[in-house]
Amino acid sequence: MARPKIDIRHFVVCRAVSWEGPPGPYTLRTLEGVCHRFGVPPGTEFPFEVDEFWTYLRVFNMNAGTGTIPFFLTLLRTGTQGTPQRIWTRPYAQIPFRSGRGVVEAAFSLKRVTFPAPGWYEFRLSREVRLRWHTRRLIVAREHVLIEK
C-alpha cells in the first residue's frame, strides 16, 4: 500500500480544547481561546511562560495510503529585523493513517511554552520527507500569534 499523501487543512493554536462527549478519535472538539493576540497578565516580566497551549490539526489523506507520519513543531520569534529566531523544535505527534479514514483530526497539548519577549511568534509544523540520498523537513502548516503586554 502507498504511503499517505496528506493535505493539512487546519492547524490552530488555542488556549484549550474540550471534548463534546467521551474522548476518542471521532469525538467532536470545541476549541477555546482561539485568538491571534494573547495578553500577558499585568506585572508579568519576560521571559513569560504559558502553562499550556493546545494545537488542533485536521489532515486529509489524499490517496488512502497507510502508515504513521511523525510531525515536528518549531516555535520561532520574528526579530526586530524581520529575521525569524528559532526558540525550540520539539517532536509533535506520530499520526497514524489508515485506508478508509480520509480525515484525521487531532488535538495535542503543549506544556510550558516560554516566550522570551513580546512580539510575533510562529508555530511551524513540519514532517520529515525521505529523499533518495537524504531526509529533509518539509513545512506543512504555520500559525502566528502575537504576545503583548
Image (tube, rainbow, N blue to C red):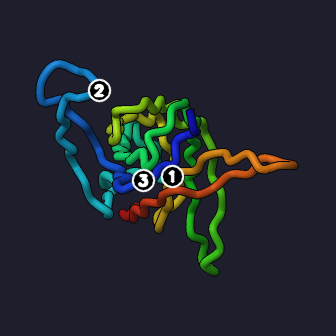
Between discs 3 and 1, the one toward the N terminus: 3
Residue 77: which disc? none
CA gap, disc 1 and disc 2: 31 Å
Looking at this rendering, what residue extends furthest in the front direction?
1
Looking at this rendering, what residue extends furthest in the left direction?
21
User: Residue 41 appears at what percent x and percent y?
Assistant: 31, 51
Q: Examine the rendered structure and indicate whether residue 42 appears above or below residue 15.
A: below
Q: Mark 3: few, some, or many residues within 10 Å (few <14, many ≥20)?
A: some
Inspect the image, locate mark 3, and give the three-letter code of the amino acid beneath it: Ile
Inspect the image, locate mark 1, and give the three-letter code of the amino acid beneath it: Phe
Residue on which disc 1 sits: 115
> Position of 93 compared to 103: left or right?
right
Q: Secondary structure at mark 1?
A: strand
Q: Secondary structure at mark 2?
A: loop
Residue 25: which disc? 2
Q: Mark 2: few, some, or many residues within 10 Å (few <14, many ≥20)?
A: few
Between discs 3 and 2, the one toward the N terminus: 3
* Residue at 56% in and 32% down: 1
Residue 8: which disc? 3
> Marks 3 and 1: CB-CB under 8 Å?
no
Locate the C terminus by quadrant.
bottom left
* Residue at 19% in and 36% down: 29
